[in-house]
Image (cartoon, rainbow, N blue to C red):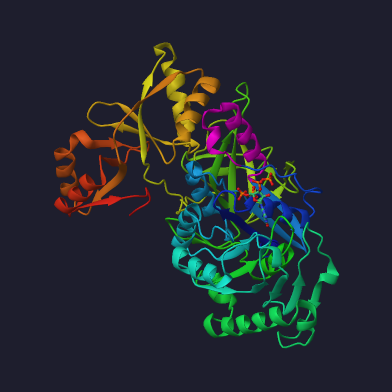
Amino acid sequence: MNELEINKRKTFGIVSHPDAGKTTLTEKLLLFGGAIQVAGAVKSNKIKKSATSDFMEIEKQRGISVATSVMAFDYKDLKVNILDTPGHEDFAEDTYRTLTAVDSVIVVIDAAKGVESQTEKLVKVCRMRNTPIIVFVNKLDREGKDAFDLLDEIESKLDIQVTPLSWPIGMGQHFKGVFSIFEKNLKLFKPHGKQDEEDTIEIASVNDPLLEKIVGIQDAKTLKEEVKLISEVYPAFEREDYLLGMISPVFFGSAINNFGVRELLDCFIQIAPQPLPRQAEERIIEPNEAGFSGFVFKIHANMDPNHRDRIAFLRICSGVFHRNTNYLHVRQNRKLKFSNPTSFMAAKKTIVEEAFPGDVIGLYDSGNFKIGDTLTEGEVLHFKGIPRFSPEMFRYVNNVDPLKTKQLAKGLDQLMDEGVAQLFTKEFDGRKLIGTVGALQFDVIQYRLLHEYGASVQFEPVNLYKACWISAEKDSDLQAFLQRRKRDLAKDKSGKWVYLAESPWALKLLQENNPEITFHFISEFE
Ligand code: G4P
């Protein structure tokens, strides 16, 4: 029974640089799955740069991102779970963490802009874990880069090997459709999403005389040449290689025109992995194990300050989760049970009785969870791969209202558990520093501390380049270093030592002069 349910599930994320078309593609996928009825139902979960000081906008976006955190739908007897990832780079850490909860990703690339910076960063994180990647080149209805050039760019900038499974015929105004290398047919393009069944023409190969009749002599000739070149240059698609993260199939289309999206989805459900095993510090956990386990990868605070509850998003890794059943909260070493676990089927929140590996459920939480927490049936497990990243922007926190010291401490504590930013306490003078990956977080923190906890803070700039975790093989080496560099040391929330480097040069020099010390840029190291 459990095995059957596991095999039905595909849990993935869509990643892209802002504006490449992630929201549009998500929406079209949901339309196919019947999860929404009309286009425009998925609000863009975007925070534009201009919105940095517009707090209402931040709140609004927060509401949207609760609703779109997980979008589950049924398609051809399968259960597809899309986990949303914020595109805005200031929230990159949120995205990194969400990527720990998926089994594969679809990367969307704008045909005109090619591979952009945010895509590069996110794919790097996927590569670290060998997450299987499918690439969707979007906006073929506009003039874009040459398809071969795009493949080269994807390979070099994303450091992945690709193989096209569809190929465009023309582009922009002359875009006629795509030849599906995967299904061996021709899909003809009509703008404005007006594709229907008749626009798919089965042809045995590009040598089929029908091809010339349909796309014209010149385009048929080009397509033949290009498909030949593809077969010579790119490896044939092997699912095994894709599952190992060694090769990424590429599709071409236009999300807004709903072109190439069904082909992408149909191929995705055939090739994408089912829920995969997860690595815990103690051992590897297989999805088909009987005992339930799962981890929290995201926490969302309720936006109503009168109800300070939060939703913790839990990815189920093994066994079956049941409502109203006692589970071990490993970090707190106590049993918890949940009366209202939520699923996000068809974009609606409903209470679930049970959930299976690959599923994500929302647990109402009054402050028990922090990111990375594990729930099990009793075994002590700590899932790996939910690191914190070395922040790059720092400010001192100054309490403006001494009467609200307690509220401030509580607010900071909870916001840090949610993963909004990281708090460091300097060893030398006990001052508290907040470190983030993006500037927007400071606005969010200040606003939320005031509105949800009644605490006022001011931030004081501090000139720092990076905070990195430190370790040494010999404890005596570490102790000696700690003694020497007292002024530049802090502890993170879990009590780990962190070195505060002022500049890349200072850090480099320090590394050279202290070879016995290892400087880590993610919090997870052994
Ligand atoms: P994002 O989530 O990755 O940030 O991108 P989103 O889907 O919001 O798309 C960004 C812009 O690109 C949108 O236009 C969207 O309509 C457009 N777009 C998406 N797919 C295609 C496509 O296949 N072809 C073309 N030509 N455009 C596409 P916008 O003007 O920013 O927003 P809107 O006013 O259309 O909502």
Of 310 and 227, nearer the camera is: 227
Q: Is residue 237 left or right of residue 128?
A: right
Tell me what residue is drawn at x 72 percent, y 58 percent: 79
Position of 290 relative to 207 (above/below): above
* Quadrant in the picture for the N terminus: bottom right
Tell me what residue is drawn at x 60 percent, y 41 percent: 46
Q: Is residue 280 left or right of residue 464?
A: right
Position of 475 relative to 261 (above/below): above
Is the stretch drawn in magenta largely helix, strand or loop?
Answer: helix
* Quadrant in the picture for the C terminus: bottom left
Of 458 and 4, nearer the camera is: 458
Q: Quadrant of residue 220?
A: bottom right
Residue extent of the magenta highlight: 46-69
Q: Is residue 216 magenta?
A: no
Tell me what residue is drawn at x 61 percent, y 59 percent: 290
Residue 268 in the image: state x and y as whole percent. 66, 66
Of 513 and 200, nearer the camera is: 200
Residue 133 in the image: state x and y as whole percent. 56, 65
Of 425 and 250, nearer the camera is: 250
Q: Quadrant of residue 323?
A: top right
Looking at the image, can residue 318 be seen?
A: no
Q: Is residue 62 magenta?
A: yes
Position of 384 relative to 303 (above/below): below
Residue 287 in the image: state x and y as whole percent. 59, 61
